[in-house]
Amino acid sequence: MDYYRFWQILLNEISAAPKNADRRIVTFKDARQYAGALSEWKSLKAKTPGLRQVQMSPLIRAFFVPAAGAGKLLHTFEDALCIEEDARIQVHAAAPEKSGTSLMPWGVKAIHAPQAWSRSTGVHVKIGVIDTGADYRHPDLKHSLASGVNLLYRGMLPFDDNGHGTHIAGTLAAAGGTRGMMGVAPRAQLYPVKAFDHNGSAYVSDIVLGIDWCVQNRIDIINMSFGMKTRSKALHDVVIKAYRAGIAIIASSGNDGKRGGDYPARYPETIAVGALDRRHRVAAFSNRGPYIDVYGPGESVTSCWLKEGYKEMSGTSMATSHVTGAAALLLALRPGLSPRELKLLLRRTASPVRLRKGQRRAALGGGAADALRLLRAGARAKRAAAAKA
């Protein structure tokens, strides 16, 4: 493969692209050819400013390029490359409903997290939160937040300029004690991965880089409260890499109120989450279907917000953070648990959801997450494994 020609074609595409042009994900099928292209890129970019806009992911052998088209590139190197649009992806939550304060939000109680804390508080479990960042000044989060990474402004802490990521962080691991809010796994360690901008929007390439970072930093669980309608090969490839590395990915199904759902929740390697309302029924806005592994509280959920505040929000985003928190409680007790084993235990220990008129249980998928039942089942499985050894 002529690597110099490869970069010259791409450089021409980058130079011709208008400002805010579509972006492309260019993935190499062969690891050796990717290594050759990477080496050439490193030698060229010092004297070629246009190539400094390119980002890369060794985990899936891909380059992310700001180029409107890639027809000539694909025609020239058709056998070596896979090229797809770097699509936009959105967080899964409605606008904040109202301000509020609650030491113990209803969702944390609904999944029986307080009853589980005598067994586990999630200590030492590392949760990657790919989102809009987090409010490092919030008193309920100051003991829970690690440095994480800011993919939009490298070198800066992943400060939240939207609020969604802070809300997710609060449900996961707020530790405000008697004066603040308590999350599901208050002793877990959160690693905010800022991939989303102030509008709650990101590119697929930002998500790929975020998962790549989580794999490199040995994160235990990744919370992904976002989604899109279309498949992405690059996103699926990096999800598979994380799954094989032993990292559980817990993803929201979307808020369209339909049978079916968004990606990445629909990939079989993730744990797909739907939302429940306060009456423990599948929320009207939640996507549903047999592919849903488990449901969590998602309607009018109070959690942390910017400027040391609290807000109510609804969405499968909120449901996902409850499920991720429950998973963290279990992983603190069973650190060697594989993503597949975690998914099976979540499904097996879920409680039946209340049905609306005309609904069939089989059409909804999994049941309601229950942290206490999850820990009890995990302990039983651990004892059974020890007895066989």
Image: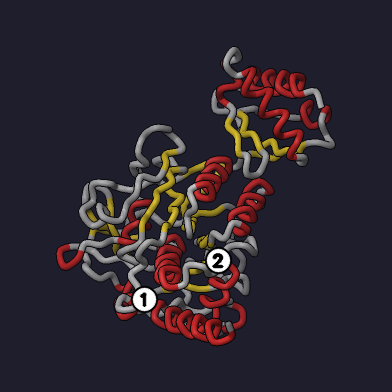
Q: CA distance from mark 2 to mark 1?
A: 20 Å
**Looking at the image, which residue is at 43% across and 83% down?**
376
Task: Give coordinates of residue 229: x percent, y percent.
Answer: 61, 54
Q: Residue furthest top?
A: 47
Q: Are marks 2 and 1 in contact (CB under 8 Å)?
A: no
| Placement of the C terminus among the 4 image quadrants | bottom right
Q: Residue furthest front?
A: 389
Secondary structure type for disc 1? loop
Secondary structure type for disc 2? strand
Q: State left or right for residue 185 relative to residue 74.
A: left
Question: Mark 1 or mark 2, which is nearer the start of the sequence?
Answer: 2
Q: Residue furthest left?
A: 179
- Circle 2 is placed at which residue position? 272
State whether residue 355 appears in this view: no
State whether residue 374 appears in this view: yes
Under mark 2, the amino acid is Ala
**Looking at the image, which residue is at 73% across and 39% down?**
31
Task: Give coordinates of residue 344: x percent, y percent.
Answer: 57, 76
* Closer-to-camera residue (214/322): 214
Under mark 1, the amino acid is Arg
- Circle 1 is placed at which residue position? 278
How many residues crowd mark 1 within 10 Å: few (<14), some (14–19), many (20+)?
some
User: Is the residue 45 above or below the residue 163 in the image?
Assistant: above
**Looking at the image, which residue is at 54% across and 54% down?**
227
